[in-house]
Image (cartoon, rainbow, N blue to C red):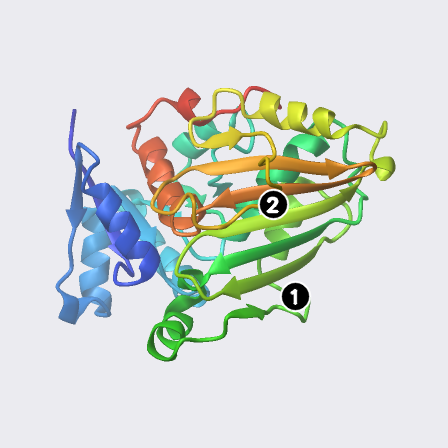
Amino acid sequence: MDEFRVFIDGEAGTTGLGIRERLRALPHVARVAVPPERRKDPAARRDAYAEADLVVLCLPDEAAREAVAMAATLGADAPKILDASTAHRVAPGWVYGFAELSPGQPGRIADSRLVANPGCYPTGGIALLRPLVAAGLLPDTYPVCVNAVSGYSGGGRAMIEAHEASGGPAFELYGLGLDHKHVPELQTYVRLARRPIFVPSVGHFRQGMIVSIPLHLDLLTGQPSAEDLHAALAAYYDGAAQVRVLPATADNKLEPEALNDTDLMELRVYARGAQAVLMARLDNLGKGASGAAVQNIRLMLGLTEAAEAAPALA
């Protein structure tokens, strides 16, 4: 098998470092490197793009858009692009890089030259809700509210430095303007007609994430039981390597750090009477960022079987 060349533009950040570390274990992949002092040199970056088969963008949104425009100037020599920013997640011409989204999604990722890596919070929210919409259990007009807590490593350099230098707040809600940049992604890929409410938060722990979504079962189509919701999730992700549908924990507790340093995600349904809470647990740096990126890199370079990541149902 030929060797593939991958350039991580912005590899000094948290996501870039995670991708670089994971690529070490990936056979047939060589990293294209730019000397640290030339990482912001347009000529050096353009040369790296021309050399690479695939470029991973770990950049702010506007810089990611500029990088895509620069890559386009290479014409036939332009590399495939995997964008880890928010810039292209709902953009025309881009494939959404959540391989478990539908049976055909791994193939679409493999065939595309432009793939947008999912956000960490939407990964959990979409994973919980898309199967219920597909099964006809959750109306697309349902008033969805997504609550989530993440470790501070997902908040960028300033937040990381604040927590690690001075301790940071024990817990903090943010995005209370209800205009968080993940909302379009959630609405689009869950296929909701009504804009969801999204309430993110950060805790004083480095990594790990829980996404929770409360539901009134008597407002869902056919008034399904908790067992019906669990069955719909289990059927949708049957055969998925990185998504596990598990029973509710016996003590009705869930902590966010259990899947740290893995690329797995766990889904559960908790219920009492006509009320339920859907729960997703993942590592915001794993399945929520770098792990998902490497899953997409494998698909884009043909280094994995598409069926490995596919769920069973539409």
Q: Dot 1: few (<14), some (14–19), or many (≥20) neighbours within 10 Å?
A: few
Decide which of 283, 108 is in the foreground and name it: 283
- Toward the front, the furthest residue is 251
- The local secondary structure at tag 2 comes to helix
Q: Nearer the viewer, residue 119 or 54?
A: 119
> Foreground residue, 66 or 292?
292
Q: Residue at x 33, y 78 (%)?
A: 165
Q: Earlier in the sequence, mark 1 or mark 2?
A: 2
Q: Amino acid at mark 1?
A: Asp
Image coordinates of residue 107 in percent, x first then y, are 45, 26
Amino acid type at circle 2 is Gly
- Which percent across, then down, holds residue 290? 35, 48
In the depicted structure, whether residue 225 falls above or below residue 280: above
Residue placed at 73% from the left, 30% from the top? Answer: 226
Q: Residue at x 74, y 49 (%)?
A: 144
Q: Residue at x 40, y 42 (%)?
A: 292
Q: Is residue 163 left or right of residue 175?
A: left
Q: Secondary structure at mark 1?
A: loop
Give the residue number, with chain letter if any, for mark 2: 125
Name the quarter where the C terminus is drawn. top right
Is residue 91 something that shows in the picture? no
Q: Going by the image, does 161 lie left or right of 62?
A: left
Q: Residue 147's quadrant in the figure?
A: bottom right
Q: Closer to the camera: disc 1 or disc 2?
A: 2
Q: Position of residue 63 (x, y in %)?
A: 39, 66
Quadrant of image for the N terminus: top left
Identify the mark at residue 131; answer none if there is no mark: none
Q: Nearer the viewer, residue 230 or 143?
A: 230
Whether residue 63 sits left or right of residue 189 in the image: it is: left
Q: Is residue 208 above or below residue 229?
A: below
Q: Is residue 206 visible?
A: yes
Which residue is disc 1 drawn over?
179
